[in-house]
Image (cartoon, rainbow, N blue to C red):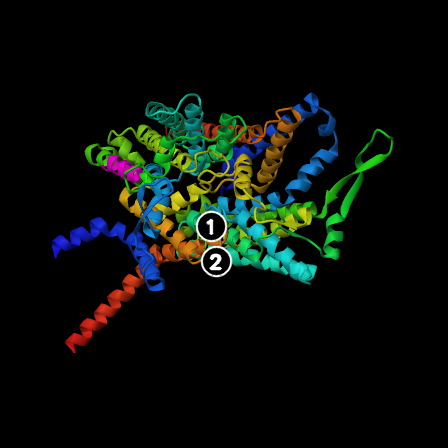
Amino acid sequence: MMRNNNLKRREPLTDTQLLLTITICIFFAMYGLAMLVWGGGFLRFQQVFDMLNNNAALIIVACGLTIVMIGGGIDISVGGVTALVVMSCIVHMNNGGSIVTAALLAVGIGLCFGLVHGFLISYLEIQPFIITLAGMFFARGMTTIVSLEPQKIAHEGFKALMKTKIEIPWLGYVAKKGNLIPARMEIGVVVALVVLIVVFIMLKKTRLGRGFYAIGGNSQSALMLGVNVKRTRFLSYLISGLLSGIAGFVFMMHTGAGNATNAAGAEMNAIASAIIGGTLLSGGVGNVIGTFFGVLTLTTIKAIVTTSGLRDPWWQSITTGAMLCFFILLQSVVLSQRAKKKAKAKELLKE
Amino acid sequence: MAQKKFNWSKYSQLMLPLISILLIVVFNLIRDPSFFSVEIAKNNVGNTVLTGNLISILNGASELAVLAMGMTLVTAACGGQDISVGALAAIAGSMFVKVLRSGEITVGSIILAFLCCCAIAIVFGAFNGTLVSVFKIQPMIATLVLFTCGRSIAYWINGGATPTVESPLINAIGSFIPGVPIPTPIIIVAICGILFALLLKFTTLGLYTQTVGINQRAARLNGINTTLIKLLSFMILGVCCAVAGCIGVSRLGLINHETLLLEIEMDAILAVAIGGNALGGGKFKVSSSVLGAYAIQALTITLYAMKVPSTAVKAYKAIVIILIVVIGSPVVKAYFSRLWARLKKSGKGMEAV
């Protein structure tokens, strides 16, 4: 990914940009199609905001996962950590804790998991899959140890925070009775968008961000370029852990209830979003903006399936699977075609 | 000495699972000396059967052991893991029940149902395998597709219900054959193990799989059809899923697409890892993975025996897993071998003095 300007001019799109463009195009095409065919809810801005409201935590988790995946690793503990954070914070607040200490607790739990994962994976060189799998087991187990019963938030201040919604009147719509209903956005969405922008800038502009691409693309050459591979890998897991902690807090702001099965399957949804957004599991290629559109694409598919009348419960995940398969195949074909072209160009250059 | 050294290198991979099993056994014997006693009892049907913790460990790990065999092959050939085995087992189990329910249950219809569910599992395995071998997608991503929608497909096959099958024959597969004191799943695992051993012993599959896993390019230049080997490994895993699904269904006498072999994919990958196989592909030992599977089950049963609530077992399991992989990690191993060498050196120095 570290190309100099000469190369860039000759080849305007990198792999990352190409996959991102494809994803964004497909998302808009799909959403446009839904607007044309079903209209109704899809024509309102509230639909988009609902998607964001329901998936703010997923966006944050997927951002962290994207960083890890760009660095060539995998973190499947994110869903478990989110659930653990939700449960612990709610129990903490119901026992008289304040919102600030709960937020600190959330960040602390996330950082702890990130710290342990990062240390074991980068310094002891153990397979990331196994370690984060154990992390997931541990987090899920601990969640039930913290509380087996579903918990409901009783903290008044937090309840008020949950109900606070940012209203945007000029994106609203006029209801049948003639009164204007403004578009509503939860605070969690603002957090998610801030995280998204910060991560985007970090990946694009900072030394650390470029380091993630370098170690994911080729850790050997990254080492020779003077990147501290172990430290960079460690930090990628640390950031992922931190973001899962924040995601837990945002999740809690959305649901206000703790349950042992909270955020079940969030890790796989996050991985799927990142892949749809053009991040390669092999590392070195990817972008958080793509991940953001990946989350939106996944949600749009689900919304389309529900509106189109396929009401049997299995259709949602079958179409999601089919869509995922389509994206994976598309990526594979596009990338292999490009690799072939590149090889040909190289040969021509030699001649 | 030379002979001894040779043996050590050949079987060193078995050490990690064996040591973990040994630790669990010793721990249990200290905690409760009668933990592993096996008793002969009569079950409610009136058969003379063996009971005890040892039997329940061997019995409970059956599905896991079968899946671990297939998973080892996939890991070795493709350098990645299949995370859809639980979903695939659910699909196979649904097919098994669907065929069984279409007519009277006899030995013939059970065999037919088993063949049907093998066929469907092989088809889905081939789907995964094609994504991996032809389109060169990492196994974890490729199988994520089936992981997301597999259980829903099983639900679809069931027609939105959780049908039951009731027959003494199915019961015999799930628990005991009348007159045989050993639980049938253990016998099925033994048969699978023997078949696997024969397959690896008398065909070139094992050698080719290892070659493809170590260096795909070199394997291809040597005339090995790498695509076929990878595809084959996924199809074999498909058969393993079918067997595991059938055992799971027969145990309960019903198919629940949501809970059948839930999260077993994670345990199966763990079994492969504890078995000391390289998760990046290459060298493998199926027997080692099977031992890993039994180690996991022994750990689970131990935790249950210690009255840990079933929902919290995962947390303790995670700690043990991390301990085991930390001990087995190359960095820690290298550190200890250096320490050992230094100790030896200083010991020799002392002798010289």
- Quadrant of the rendered image containing residue B241: top left
A92 is higher (above) or lower (below) than A202: below
Residue B36: horizontal and vertical position, in percent?
31, 55
Few, some or many residues within 10 Å of mark 1 (<14, 14–19, 20+):
many
Q: CA distance from mark 2 to mark 1?
A: 10 Å
- Quadrant of the rendered image containing residue A343: top left
Question: Is residue B171 left or right of A103 when viewed as pictured?
Answer: left
A31 is higher (above) or lower (below) than A204: above
Residue nearest the viewer, comparing B269 with B142: B269
Q: What's the amino acid at mark 1?
A: Thr
Question: Is residue A51 left or right of B136 when viewed as pictured?
Answer: right
SS type, badge 1: helix
Assess whether residue B210 is covered by the magenta stretch.
no
The residue furthest right is A178
Label 2 resides on the chain identified as A
Residue B156: horizontal and vertical position, in percent?
52, 27
Q: What's the amino acid at mark 2?
A: Val
Q: Which disc, if any, is residue A116?
A: 2
Residue B208: horizontal and vertical position, in percent?
25, 34
Q: Residue at x 45, y 51 (%)?
A: A134
Assess whether residue B196 is covered by the magenta stretch.
yes
What main secondary structure does the magenta stretch of the protein show? helix
Contact check, label 2 and label 1, Cβ < 8 Å: no
Quadrant where the N terminus of chain B lies? bottom left
Quadrant where the C terminus of chain B lies? bottom left
**Residues in magenta, as a range:** B187-197
Label 1 resides on the chain identified as A
Residue receiving disc 1: A132
SS type, badge 2: helix
